[in-house]
Image (cartoon, helix red, strand yellow):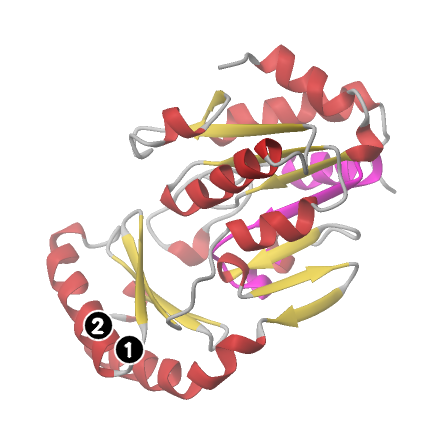
């Protein structure tokens, strides 16, 4: 485990050769009862703008649809990966993984069924590519939602991805945050990922693998701690910060050290 000072030093030693990737929910944005209300902490957009100007690459890698990410973080030059890497954007060019297309009819049917059987605030359709069921607003319905998600996924030939207080019904493809992480850090010497949840563990593992294989000189895995963080988080990361505010403070220090001004 390293401390924040060492993390900042590593990320600013060679800024042009450094890629910084961050999760959204629970990392840049605090968790809220209703998923659609999530917003990044005040000051986050400005700090990310400065980092985009000063680092080789900055990206947000999230389970959210890319349209959601771009509306909350409208930053020129920022790369995005939505839906755990089923859609992504680098340099303003957006791509949907072609492997998902055969499953879009099944996803639409599953989404319609779930919307008919659950309250609207528990069902989050995601760009027609997947659908997430949330029980944070109704924790007493967790077991019911898990059973329903499994039943619908099986009948429509889809798979399930369990996250915190939620489960996603999605195409049965081996796509997770390791995929966009590998793409986004390719060609860089130093790479970091900041995340807080089960969905971020594959990204942490991928960074470690790339460092072992010599494709990265330095990998830094930043854990964003909270009362809801999985127990596996501490073993998967190199440094821990306290919630989104702790991550924002770290990112601000990196931006300050690089010395890039806020874009006008």
Find residue 129 and report its horizontal and vertical position in percent: 46, 74
From this viewpoint, is residue 239 visible? yes
Figure check: 47 above or below 96: above
**Residue drawn 62% across and 41% down?**
21
Figure check: 102 above or below 83: below
Q: Is residue 54 magenta?
A: yes
Q: Which residues are magenta?
A: 43-69
From this viewpoint, is residue 124 visible? no
- In the rendered structure, the answer to whether residue 81 lies left or right of residue 136 reads right
**Residue drawn 42% across and 82% down?**
103
Dots 1 and 2: beta carbons under 8 Å?
yes
Along the viewing direction, whichever of 204 and 257 lies nearer the viewer:
204
Figure check: 129 above or below 106: above
User: In which quadrant of the rendered view does residue 215 lie?
Assistant: top right
Along the viewing direction, whichever of 73 and 217 lies nearer the viewer:
217
Residue ID for mark 1? 115
Secondary structure of the residue carrying numbered label 1: helix
Mark 2: few/some/many CA within 10 Å (<14, 14-19, 20+): few
- In the rendered structure, the answer to whether residue 187 lies left or right of residue 205 reads right
Find residue 28 and report its horizontal and vertical position in percent: 54, 39
Residue ID for mark 2? 118
């Amino acid at each position: 485990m390293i401390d924040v000072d060492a993390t900042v030093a590593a990320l600013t030693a060679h800024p042009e050769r450094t890629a910084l990737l961050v999760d959204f929910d629970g990392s840049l944005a605090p968790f809220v009862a209703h998923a659609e209300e999530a917003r990044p902490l005040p000051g986050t957009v400005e700090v990310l703008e400065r980092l985009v100007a000063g680092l080789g690459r900055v990206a947000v890698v999230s389970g959210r649809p890319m349209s959601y990410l771009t509306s909350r973080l409208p930053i020129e030059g920022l790369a995005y990966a939505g839906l755990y890497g089923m859609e992504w954007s680098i340099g303003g060019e957006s791509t949907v993984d072609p492997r998902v297309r055969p499953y879009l009819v099944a996803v639409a049917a599953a989404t319609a069924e779930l919307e008919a059987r659950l309250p609207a605030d528990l069902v989050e359709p995601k760009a027609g590519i997947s659908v997430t069921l949330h029980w944070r607003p109704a924790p007493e319905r967790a077991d019911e939602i898990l059973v329903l998600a499994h039943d619908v996924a099986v009948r429509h030939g889809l798979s399930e991805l369990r996250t915190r207080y939620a489960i996603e019904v999605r195409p049965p493809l081996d796509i997770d945050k390791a995929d966009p992480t590998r793409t986004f850090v390719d060609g860089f010497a130093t790479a970091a990922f900041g995340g807080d949840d089960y969905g971020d563990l594959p990204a942490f593992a991928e960074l470690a693998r790339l460092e072992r294989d010599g494709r990265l000189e330095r990998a830094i895995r930043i854990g964003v701690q909270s009362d809801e963080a999985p127990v596996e988080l501490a073993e998967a990361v190199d440094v821990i910060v306290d919630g989104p505010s702790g991550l924002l403070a770290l990112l601000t220090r990196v931006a300050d050290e690089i010395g890039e001004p806020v874009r006008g």
